[in-house]
Each structure stands twice: as structure tokens, then as C-alpha cells.
Amino acid sequence: MSANPIGVECKFLVDGTLTVSHVDLEGRWTAVEQGRQWVDQLGRHVLLMLPGQIVREIRLRPDTMTWELLPEKKQNTYLV
């Protein structure tokens, strides 16, 4: 599964971090809560909480300066 382009409304802060406030989901701008963020060789990653307490990851690609909504990760299930 590949990542999908996504519109993101955010502010870059003086310390280099950013704050994401809204994302464009299927043509509708939706308010989000932001979690952890990090940078690696693939770009800047941000965890978001979407409505319904759905956690998703977005990534800003440095080569194109475009945001992508990454595919959902399957959660591990453990037998206890």
C-alpha cells in the first residue's frame, strides 16, 4: 500500500517543530490533535488523532514538500 497525498494546515515553530491543526480528508478540512513528531531519511513524520480517536501518521516529503497520509498500520495482537 502506498501513501496518499493530503492537505495539511500547520505552523512551523522557531525551534523547527510544527503544529498541525487541520487536514483535508476527502475534501473536508478536519480538526486534529497532534501527537509525537520525528524526522528521518524519509521526511518529517507526525502522529495525528482524527475524529473517532483514530490514530494516523502523516509525512512531509523533503524532496517534493508534499504531505502524505501513510497507510494504516496493522496492530499486533497478542494471546495472553
Image (tube, helix red, strand yellow):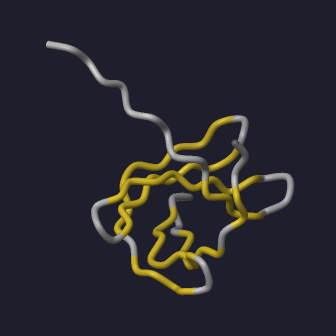
Looking at this view, is 33 or 78 the one in front?
Answer: 78
Q: Please tell me which residue is depicted at 14% across the width and 13% down the height of the picture.
A: 80
Q: Please tell me which residue is depicted at 44% across the width and 53% down the height of the picture.
A: 47
For residue 14, above or below residue 24: above
Q: Position of residue 44 (x, y in %)?
A: 62, 50
Residue that extends furthest to the bottom in the rendered view of this protein: 28
Q: Position of residue 6 (x, y in %)?
A: 66, 69
Residue that extends furthest to the top in the rendered view of this protein: 80
Q: Please tell me which residue is depicted at 51% across the width and 46% down the height of the picture.
A: 72
For residue 8, above or below residue 48: below
Looking at this view, is 19 or 7 the one in front?
Answer: 7
- Residue 35 is drawn in which quadrant? bottom left
Residue that extends furthest to the left in the rendered view of this protein: 80
Give the left or right position of residue 16, taking residue 77 as reference.
Answer: right
- Residue 30 is drawn in which quadrant? bottom left
Give the left or right position of residue 58, taking residue 19 as reference.
Answer: right
Q: Position of residue 51 (x, y in %)?
A: 33, 71
Give the left or right position of residue 79, taking residue 47 as reference.
Answer: left
For residue 57, above or below residue 15: above
